[in-house]
Image (spheres, coloured by chain):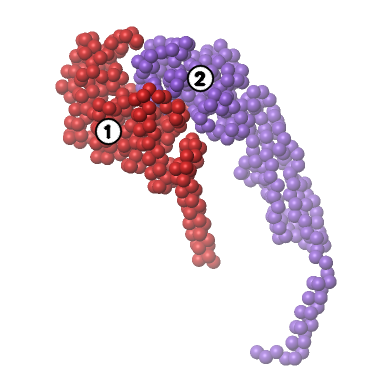
Chain colours: A red, B purple
Amino acid sequence: MRILLTLFLVLLVTGTAAAQGNSQAALVQALTKGVALEHVLTEVESIGPKRVDAELRGALIARLEQLNQQVADAIKIDQTVDTFIAPETLAQLSRLVADFRDPRAVAALSRATYGGPAAVRALVAFGEQTALPTVMKVAMAPSSHYTEVEHVLTTMRVLVEQGKVSPAGRAQIQAAAKARLTGDQYFTIVWHAIDLAGVLKDPELNAILNDLATDPNESVRRGIVNDEVPDLIVRTQKRAADRLAGEPPLPRAADIMTERRPEP
Amino acid sequence: MRLKIWQIVMVSFVVVVLAVFATVTPARAQTVNAALDNPFNTDLTGVFEFEVGCTVTYGIEGGWSYAYIYLTIAGEQQWSEYIEWYDINTKYLAKKVVAKPYDRDITCEVSGNIGYDTAQGTIRAGCDNTERDVIAREYDQFGVTPKPFCGDIRNQSPNYQYAPHFNWGELNGYFTTGNPHYGYGWIKSSLTNGLEATRSNYGASIYLSSGYRCPHGNAAVRGVSNSLHMQGRSADMYNNSCKCWTQSQFDALRSAASTTGTVELLFWTSYSDRHLHAAW
């Protein structure tokens, strides 16, 4: 009787797993056959990110990489994302891929700037060895879009604040902060680089922050002007001063690393 | 062991008698039926407590039978009863239940020695026979989850100051296409907190072009099928009502929002109408 019961349970479990495997294979097929991504994502979310198999994870990571490239290409010709995919779906895909915690997703997540803190949280969780080389490439590449640079500067900031970097890694991050605080930069990049410099507490970077905080021309030298937004220089000065005074940047690292569900 | 002749004859006789009896005697009628009475599958807007009835007809004509009857509401077994009787009988069982919005699946099952039957229905209970119910139905109709509870859907005047710098109308897209249920909407505190923090960082007023969308309204504006607008968590923003701004003005507002714990925050080239979409 006991043997029969055990056999029944084994058959039940393997049968369920096989059925789930089949449905996941069908979702991989759906992705390749052009079924609307939002419908596939709804199905995947109902499975739960932890139960998604390697093949389906790989397919979704590949789709995110492909869409990242499509977005980058569209930006170059000022084509808007909504002409080829719903931007909210893109955000949902990046959140889902981030939740997989699959190291194959590092490249895709390093450029996934749509989904709030989930991608940053995943990259930080991968750690310096796995994530930093790719993150650094995005941070230093002249071709990176400014939202991508903001995203990886925040990732590096959280890595530092979480104490997850070696001295060598810290040196690389300092180099990235310096590079993005130097020369002509979009104002949001400078703001994120200020936040990163603030947590690194490096004397050379602090000197740059001091210059930015005290001299409005330092902002102008970096291409920040009070043109369309009247107080950009004042905001840049205040940000640098706040970081020098030890005020931690927002969002706080602890908040980024804590997955929160919205209140009812 | 060897059987004697008379034993073989006796056994053969019994077998033949049984076979003849089985052939000549007609099969006894059996009935296995479970049925739910009204008000299943009907709208019960405004009714919160009512009686659920289940009629079970079960048994063997001229024979004994037994069975269990179960009533299950929304996956929870409400009661069960054991029946044991002679011949075919009918039993009506009723129980008072509270219909909790929204739809709750009801099952009545009878299962015993002669068979099994089940009847299924749905209590369609509503909130208060207002637009709340209309909105709630849309979540079922469009398959959107999670759906709001009655208390989540508030009814306010559009001018009602729901958050320090945002009134109810603004948060609900001014009750136009995205949410045409005038006065009714679902706004999460994460949205109002996020918007207030963004406004504070930005240092100027924000114009909301879209906030809460009911599922029907979301489809009407071609929103994605699982948009956080339908969870009262998203807003589309500009820095002015003319919806005309530049990329750096957009990015100044995006930057202000980026420090507030957004879960979605899109960029300048996301939408053709250049709105800033954020969700908290």
Residue drawn at 74 percent across, 87 percent down: B8
Identify the subunit bearing mark 2: B
Label 2 is placed on what type of residue? Answer: Ser
Residue A165 falls in which quadrant of the image?
A: top left
Q: State whether residue A70 appears in this view.
A: yes
In the rendered view, does A76 fall on the left or right side of A208? right
Considering depth in this image, is B67 or A53 the residue closer to the camera? A53
Same-chain status of marks 2 and 1: no
Residue B280 falls in which quadrant of the image?
A: top left
Identify the subunit bearing mark 1: A
**Which residue extends farthest front?**
A77
Image spot of residue B106 (x, y percent):
67, 42
Q: State whether residue A156 appears in this view.
A: no
Image spot of residue A117 (x, y percent):
37, 30
Image spot of residue B112 (x, y percent):
70, 57
User: At numbered mark 2, what does the secondary structure look like: helix, strand or loop?
Assistant: strand
Considering depth in this image, is A1 or A72 the residue closer to the camera? A72
In the depicted structure, whether residue B28 falls above or below residue A26: below
Residue drawn at 50 percent across, 63 percent down: A7
User: At numbered mark 1, what does the secondary structure look like: helix, strand or loop?
Assistant: helix
* Residue beneath disc 1: A135
Badge number at residue B210: 2
Q: CA distance from mark 2 to mark 1?
A: 34 Å
